[in-house]
Every structure is written in C-alpha cells, then in structure tokens.
Amino acid sequence: MEFDMIIHNGLIVSDTTVLPLGNEIGVKNGKISCIGMSLPSGPKTERVDAEGAYITPGGVDAHVHLAQTNAPTGDTWETGSRSAIAGGTTTILAFASQKRTDTSLIPVLDDYYQKARGQSYADYGFHFILTNPTRDILQKEFPIMANEKGVTSVKLYMTYEPMKLTDRDLLDIMISCRALGLTTMIHAENSDMIALIIEGLERNGNTDPFYHAIARPRIAEDEASYRAISLAELVGAPILIVHMSSKVAVEHVRHAQARLLPIHAETCPHYLFLLSENLKSKPSDHFCGAMHVCSPPLRHRVEDLEDLWQGIANGTFTVFSSDHAPSKYDHPGGKKLGLVNGIPMFSKIPNGLPGVETRLALLFSESEACLPPAEARLSLPRFVQLTSTNPAKMYGLGGCKGSILPGYDADFVIWYPTSSDQAPTEITQKMLHHGVDYTPFEGVKIRNWPRYTILRGKVVWNRDSGKVLGEMTYGQYLKRGKGEVLVGKSSLTPRGMLDNERDMWMPKR
C-alpha cells in the first residue's frame, strides 16, 4: 500500500496510553489506515516529521456558538471555524436555536444548515436549543432529527426568560431523548434566585459589570444542578450538565456518579483560569469588565478554581469544552449594549466569551506534556479523553472522531517538541484568528501550542508559516449517531421506589 501521508518521529497519545517513539501513522483517503513501525513511503507519500513532539487526536469542541441571531457581532462560521483549526480543533458542534414561536424544528435546522454550508474550515454538526417542546416535536420530529438528519442532542435552559423551561418540560424532553438515545444537555441555574438578586442590585444602584458575578451566586447553580439530577433520576435519563463552575454542584454530580447514575459534567477554560476580579473596572476603561461576562459567572476565589481542577483530574468531568459564545467588545451591538445612556447595566451585557482557539493549549499546558508529573494537573491520556475521545463518543461520533485508531478520520494535532522555543509563551489577541476584538485570556501563560492541525489527512494549520492552510469549503457536515452513556447506567430504579414502579406511569413506546 502507498500511503497518502505518514506521520513519524512522534509520541502518539490515545485516551489510555502514550505510544513510544518509533510508531508511525499511515493515512489513506482521509482515514487512519494503520499504526506501525517503519511504514513504507511511495513517491506520492507526504511525510510529516513530528520531531519528537506529542501527537494527539484533533480536538472535538462540543459547545460552540456560531452565527446565532442573539449574537449579531459574534463569530460567523467562517471566522469561528478558522479559529478552531488554528487552535487544534478539527470538529465543532454548534447550536441551532429554536425560538418560542417556532412550532417546528425542521425550518430551524434548514436555516442554520444554510448558514454553515460551505463556510466551515472544520468538520461540524449541530445541537438544538429547545425552547418550545410541543408534543409534535417530541413525538414526530425528534425521530426524524435523530434518524434522518443526524442531530442527536438538545440543550435545555433552566434560566434566561426567552429560553427557560419548566421542570415538567424538562421531564417530557428527557423521556423523549432517553427513548431515542439523544444526548440531553442542561444549563443549570436557578432563574428565580437570579431574578431576585438582579432586582435588588439594580434597586441599590449596583449595576457595573462586576455585579454580574454577584447576581448569579454559586448556590443558584448548586440548587439547579441537584434538581436537574433529581429529574433525570426520576425518569432514568442520562444528562450532561454544561459549563459547571461550582464545587458543590460538581459534588452533586460526583455523588450521583457514585450511585451509577448516568450524569455527565462539562467545564470550560474560563472556570479554571479566570476569577471574578476580571469583571472589575480599570482607570483606563470603567466598562472593561464586560469582556468577562458569562453565565454561570466567573467565581471569586482561587479555591473555586482548584476545586474544579480536582474534577478534571479525578474523572468527574466528562468533557472540556470552550462554550465559545463571543460578542465584540467595542461595538454598540455587542458588549456595549450594557451601556445604557452611558450608565453600565450588567444585566444588559450579552453573555459569553471567545475561547474555541485557546481551549486545547490552555489544558495541554497543564498536563504532563509540559510539567513534571508532580506539578501536572492531568495526564496526557486524560487530556485526550476530555478534549477529543469523550465528546466524540457522547455526541454520536465514536468510530469516526476523537481517537487515533485505524478506521477513524485522520484528524491530528502535532504539538511543538518539549525542548522547542517556538511555541508562544502567553496568549494575546494579536495571535488569534477569531472574528471578535478581544480574548479574555490576554496575557495568560501557556507552554505549548498546536504546531500542525491535520483534518482528514490534510494539513490545515501550520504555525511555523503562521498560516491557516485549509479551505473554508473543506469542512464537512457530520450526520451523527446516538450518543454513548459514558458514566453509570440508564434506567436504574430511583431510591425508595419499587423495582417496577416506574413502569406504572412511564409512557409506552
């Protein structure tokens, strides 16, 4: 066999181990053909020398907001996907958002697909944000979306007035998703707690950006997370609680997992590296804290960060996503919507931060690839689990994305060798490729950066030349299968119930 590409002289990292030097990757027709020693080259074989560096699977970022109508100054598919591959992410899953007035998901999907089609440097798929879960949608359209369209995940909100659902809505959706094998994602914050606090802050004139972190305290996330887990336990449904930021909420997940409940958890870079002090004003710009407004908010203490790092290391978190949800800062339709007649109003600031390009480097820099084992916060296989393998499996891309195995797509990140001085030492806005005008990680120290990104056997990013080499039309739509349950078991009997009690009231399929 003549390979199209051979990657040699690298340390191949899987979700379980690191292969020693000497192993090579043979690529044919965009797929991994084999992993072996001394693979033969032909006259047309492209040989890529990793120069002793680590080779990890292409990143799978399963929580990315692009081209959404509620963020008109945010990234388009072109700029967001370009930023993704420059940061080592080869697959992105973004959100097609249903409005309250939408009575069908089919036109929502068609409209969003047209925005992405031919506009993505990375391979891509969609989740639905569900806000109007009618009976027809749950019973008739969900099966079409899952079996014909390959959209096998939904995101549900317990907060935000235009989007939040009742507990009964959540239960009905969980039951439908469980029957079809769809992945249910939940934004867990107590909406009424938040509304009460916002009213009080505004009444007392506390409206600067920093008060966004006061308005959404940890207890609001703690309560909603526990409630979401309880609802899921009642109906035997697996769920993923997204962008978790609170120690107590994560402990709820850990306790549920210890009881073998299928409760998955996600966190994001900003909750591991940034604190609420970033929302405070500066003498040069009293509104600059708006650049760090996201929900849940950045937490107050270093201890809050450390608690989440424990969840990264001990397996509580299933996936590590960017929650890339940007709006421009210096734009009247972006973050500065929160300046009302020149007065800061934190409750009007669009939520969300850019982060799709910086996600991998931030976490990789804290791994054993960059630090002595005693100082590293996670192993290299754990890095691969969180950033590639687990999200691929959870969202129906197992067997295709997220692993370096024969038959999988030839998606790779080749990092700089440990001894190299070519990798950047800190993050700056100037080095990034997104379409927004700032990064919340400005000045954050890093120890490595993707040198090459390879998507389906094609080098699409080469940092040595400083270029995105891929084409905007190269990204392919991914029709996904059913998601896998990676934690616990579905349909365990809730505590205190008879073994057959759920069968007495659960809908028949």
Image (spheres, rainbow, N blue to C red):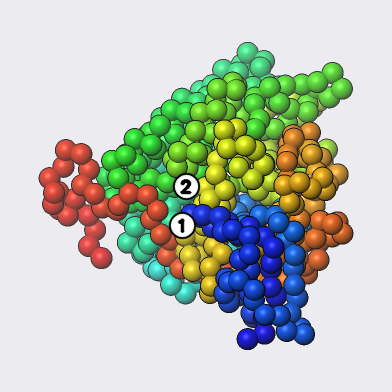
Name the residue: 24% across, 49% down.
Answer: 492
Q: Rounded to the nearest whole Å, what is the CA distance between mark 2 and mark 1? A: 9 Å
The kind of residue on which mark 1 rests is: Met
The kind of residue on which mark 2 rests is: Thr
- For disc 1, the marked residue is 394
Which of disc 1 and disc 2 is earlier in sequence? Answer: 2
- For disc 2, the marked residue is 318
Residue 252 tag number: none
Q: Is 505 situated left or right of 320 in this image?
A: left
SS of the residue under disc 1: helix
Pick out the residue farthest to the top. 204
Closer to us: 43 or 476? 43
Name the residue: 74% across, 35% down.
Answer: 445
Q: Is residue 75 visible?
A: no
SS of the residue under disc 2: loop
Q: Residues within 10 Å of mark 1 (few under 14, many from 20)?
A: many
Residue 398 screen position, x and y as percent: 48, 65
Q: Does the CB distance between marks 2 and 1 fall below 8 Å?
A: yes
Name the residue: 55% across, 22% down.
Answer: 303
